[in-house]
Amino acid sequence: MAIGALYGVFFLWPLVNVAMRSFSPTGTLSYDPGGFSIVNYKLLFTDKILRDVVVNTVVTASISTILTFVFAFPTAYLMTRLRRSVSTTLFMMILLPFWVSILVRLFAFLELLSANGPVNSLFETLGMGRQSLLFNTTGTVIGMVNYLLPYMILVLFAAMSGIDPNLTRAAKSLGCSSWRAFRSVYLPLVRGSIVGALLLNFIIATGFFLTPAILGGPQDTTVSTYIAQQVQNYKWGTASAFGVVLLLATCLGFTLAGRMTGLTSGSGVVLSGSKGVSREQAMPFGPAKVALWSVTSAVLLFLFAPLLFVLPLSWGVDSTIAWPPRGFTLHWYAKALTDPLWTASMRKSVLVGAAVAVLCLVIAIFLARWVRGLAARPRLQGFVVSVVYLPIVVPVILLAIGTFDVQARIGALDTWWGLVLVETVLALPFTYLVVAAALDNVDPSLERAAWTMGASKIYALRKVVVPTIVPALIGAALLAFISSWDEAVVALFQTGFDKTLPVNFYSSLKSGASPVIAAIGSMLMLLVVVLAALYVGIRAVVGRRRTQEPSSVDDSPSRKGHTK
Amino acid sequence: MTITQHLDDTTAASAPQAYIKVTDLHHEYGGITALDCVSLDVQPGEFVTLLGPSGSGKSSLLHILAGLVDPSSGTISIAGTDVTRTPPQKREIGLVFQNYALFPHMTAEENIRFPLNVRKVSDTEAAERVAEVLKLVELSALAQRRPEQLSGGQQQRVAVGRAIAAVPKVLLLDEPLGALDRRLRQQLGREIRRVQRETGITTIYVTHDQEEAFTMSDRVVVMNHGEIRQVGTPEEVYSTPRDAFVANFVGEVNLWPVEVSPLGGGLVDARTDGGASFDASYGSAAQGGTDSLVAAVRPEKVWAWHPDDSVPHPDVQLVDTGVIVESTFLGNSRSVVIESDLLGKTSALLYDGESPRYSGERVSVGWQPRHALVVPEDAGSA
């Protein structure tokens, strides 16, 4: 119930709100059917400027999606063909930049691609001359691909690891060449997932706000940046009409993509592991493997270079950012940690993030158990899972303007709890994914066993179910925290005086980079590394404690009882 | 009070009334009838096995007894108290799951201690009880291991220990040996019975394996399609099955549809479709019924001898003569299939010294009238 209310107020109402406004010629909100008009929608198709915005958005998103796929497919395929330890490491490496604030990455690209930046220096030494890489479509596409790559790789990897490698082996044993086996057996099996992944990424790309806002130029406004500009000038009419169209396209695309990738079937858990695929036989060394590895290396370089690039920027002694940096100082770090502007926003971000983490965890546990109990009603189950996942794909700018309006109405604007509740809705998909996967791996008979021994339902949950999934719960809480910690768009519209850290970061980026931003960016990045290391460490400790003692030798091999 | 002292309590309490009383239990889920009119009495300290093929309702009955599933109608009482709507937490039962359901984050000792913690037993008493249980299931040396460090058999012992640690009124076991190999199954089956005897806990055991059912139980309840088909000691169920299903499910059997005419003295003259005719005993369930009847003869009761020789035992009647078409060596015996004109195929189990026994040899086949039992094809629920 409470969860329903949360989604009602902080997810559905904002969207409905935007929809209502789109039907008013003046863009004001009224529930009076008399003022109903579709003039805003007409404008979308007649006004030349608006049409350019649409074309520009679609073109940028398409190019980004296709480029992303070209790099993601070989990487994901290679990951399914490597020994498990190697592929897990790759998996972790691809996940890591995913959790580093997009603002930090955008900042890095701003510097990397700038007219005097290292990329242009390289071009010049190669004799290609300086190129204009920023504040145009090129810049936006580079930023989008960087952001989309982990998404695409994850979805493709999930689909591909569900395919039994024995199938291609069987094809080869029947006389197919490697290429032919790949084309006639493997590709048809992943085709649905590929189309789904492309669609999913295209949707996400059309909804991008921060990337075009920072890396794009004034000529190539996208739908999201246009909406933001208009709303900031209190011109809701065409902006909300745009929003509704974007939302409908998103919902439609998401449903289709979900069907094709199987993301919304069952309790929505696709990344939960191997599905019994044997991977003892790694891919043999050969030209195909070399080619795959070179693409994968390029992907890793592209994902990590901007992150690593932030570090040297933060330690130069000059008071403006310069490349290459001169000297070495930690002065900017000290300044970032003492300047009240930054410390206040950090404190606020930590508080909000912690509250979001706790709230998300509790909701995710109950939600996951409830959804699992709905197995007998697959339609309702699928619907609930879709709603939980929707915030990932609904263009964040829409939620931002919608909640901005709703919160102003219910007096939650500029309050810390208002922000916490919105961020919870945004972070829940990630938390839910992890918690549901973990709970799915807990044998339901454990709980029943506890009941028969007299344990109440709460006691059984607390003493039996939760302890067995502690590592996953910690991971889920971290994900929720980072999701809220990084979120800038909703918070941008939310906070008046005391801004959160990413909002401050965004404003500073817009007003001109300084080494303090580089220092903060480095710290944000290191925080993710520390949290990730912490998580890996805890898992390792828990794992070691479990296998401290030697395995027994007397009767039958261990774990036999669990294989049923 | 230790667990084994509990034995005296239950025997002292042994009144003529049943300890577990199941009355007219009916259960449906998703439109499928899982249990239909099931009634069963279990005496204090008794070891009763629910035996049946998968889908027969035996596991449903066990889960209803445990309180994990609510029956559509009917009542259950344990020790004179109606527990039909009592949640599992309040039933004081011990349930051993098919996959053991050991808590993976706890050691063997902590698993066994769990029910005592739930019931807030004092630390010293709990420690004593846990030590006693560990000794009873012979796991004292492995108390500090986690489930994943234990073999399948050891995990199974932890599961039994955990189920009896809080001295439940009833111990329920749901195919607890299914995941183990044959030799271990036999060994652990004997141990479960030993622990049950030493503790005296009234026990209901579910299995689809008739050998397990026979070697462990005081009484066997044969189930099929949600109905109880027969209740009796292993001997009763094996040698005087109520109908063709029970006869077939509890062991190998030759079955022939027959027409009968009475001979007196409990005997009938049975005639098969093929024209074979022999004397047979008339099972009680067959009397008065209009159902189609079958004659059941266990392979080990079938005699085979050389056609030129005389009948090997005065009571054995010659039924037909045929050829051995299959002969399989089983170690302590030999299983043969004899093809003959009147009977069709007949299975026989031949021991050392009996001959002929190899494929292609001609034999005479027969049996004693008391070993051929005429029963209904389907006697319905017991």
Image (cartoon, rainbow, N blue to C red):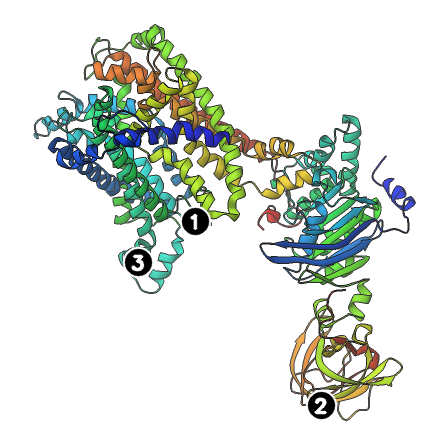
Query: Closer to the camera, A546 or A248?
Result: A248
Question: Of the residues shown, which amino acid type is indicated by label 2?
Answer: Gly
Nearer the observer: mark 2 or 3; the answer is 2
Query: In whole angstroms, how far apart are the C-alphas of marks 1 and 3?
Result: 20 Å
Q: Which chain letter goes with mark 2?
A: B
> Chain ID for label 1?
A
Q: In percent of the image, x 62 and y 39: which residue is there?
A: A447
Question: In this orientation, does residue A249 appear?
Answer: yes
Foreground tag (2 vs 1): 2
User: For the residue labelled by badge 3, is the local secondary structure a helix, a strand or a loop?
Assistant: helix
Residue position for label 3 = A181
| Numbered label attached to residue B275 | 2
Around disc 3, counting alpha carbons within 10 Å, would you say few (fewer than 14), some (14 to 19), or many (20 or more)? many
Q: Which residue is mark 1?
A: A280
Q: Chain of mark 3?
A: A
Query: CA separation, marks 2 and 1?
Result: 62 Å
Question: Disc 1, disc 3: CB below 8 Å?
Answer: no
Amino acid type assigned to the residue bearing label 1 in the image: Glu
Q: Nearer the viewer, residue A163 or A293?
A: A163
Characterize the local packing of mark 2: few (<14), some (14-19) or many (20 or more) Cα atoms within 10 angstroms: few
Say if mark 2 contacts mark 3, CB within 8 Å: no
Q: Please, what secondary structure does the residue beneath circle 2 have?
A: loop
**Horizontal arrangement in the rendering, residue B116 relative to residue A206 (left or right):** right
Indicate whether B37 appears above or below B354.
Answer: above
Q: Which residue: 43% across, 31% down? A: A7
Q: Is residue B295 above or below residue A191?
A: below
